[in-house]
Amino acid sequence: MSLPSLDPNWTENFDFLKPEWNSWSRNCILYYLAKLSKATYTAEIGIGHYCNGVYALGTHAKEIGGIHYSIDIYHGWCNRANIIKEFYDLPVEVINVDSKKAKVGRWLHLCYIDGDHSYDGVVGDIKNFAPKIRRSGFLIFDDYGKKHLEVTQAVDAMHNSEKWEMTVFPVAWWAIWRRL
């Protein structure tokens, strides 16, 4: 999976359409995790500057006939996500709202959380999105580990081993929950 070659004059004005070198590999892993789990409905909390998740999970959704939800409180990232959605004709619904208040009217197979890195922010995202994950579906938390102590503390405090299996993927700074 790679971005098509674009007109260099055009990408100078839209540098965010080019993959971010240090996170593109993580988003390829997201793409293949979605593909392997046959995830029809996916979501990401926190779009970010380069919108790589929009492209990776949106591409998967297009291939499988699904929908990807991109949620961010910052309108600038949402505008960029909409440009990528239109440019690649991806089945992405961009939701510009605080993720703790976001409404997604479907069961999700995969939700990638990389939004508010405060303890309360992570707990709020877990409370809002964990109940929407289907059996055998995934909640993936970015920046887990020493890098962001509050993310790690919130994920550990909220983990319920009777409902969720947890794996730590330290290379990407991820904690991955799989619903039992």
Image: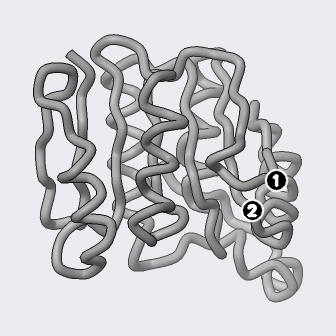
Q: Residue at x 62, y 47 (%)?
A: 100
Q: CA distance from mark 2 to mark 1?
A: 5 Å
28 up-or-down from 108: above or below: below
Task: Name which residue type carries label 2.
Answer: Ile
Q: How does the figure colour the protein chain or chains?
A: one colour
Answer left or right for 107 relative to 15: left
Q: Residue 104: percent from the left, percent from the top?
A: 69, 27
Answer left or right for 67 relative to 127: right
Q: Secondary structure at mark 2?
A: loop
Q: Secondary structure at mark 1?
A: strand
Q: Residue at x 67, y 37 (%)?
A: 69
Q: Residue at x 26, y 21 (%)?
A: 179
Q: Residue 75: percent from the left, percent from the top?
A: 85, 67
Q: Residue 167: percent from the left, percent from the top?
A: 12, 43
15 up-or-down from 1: above or below: below
State which tag comes first along the sequence, 2 or 1: 2
State the residue lying farthest toward the top: 135
Residues tagged 2 and 1 counted as in contact (Cβ below 8 A):
yes
Q: Residues within 10 Å of mark 1 (few under 14, many from 20)?
A: some
Q: Residue at x 35, y 22 (%)?
A: 137
Residue hosting label 1: 96
Of residue 178 and residue 34, the one placed in the foreground of this image is 178
Q: Residue 138: percent from the left, percent from the top?
A: 33, 31
Residue 73 is labelled as 2
The answer to which image quadrant residue 98 occupies is: bottom right
90 up-or-down from 148: above or below: above
Task: Name which residue type carries label 1.
Answer: Asn
Of residue 162 and residue 104, the one placed in the foreground of this image is 162
Answer left or right for 123 relative to 91: left
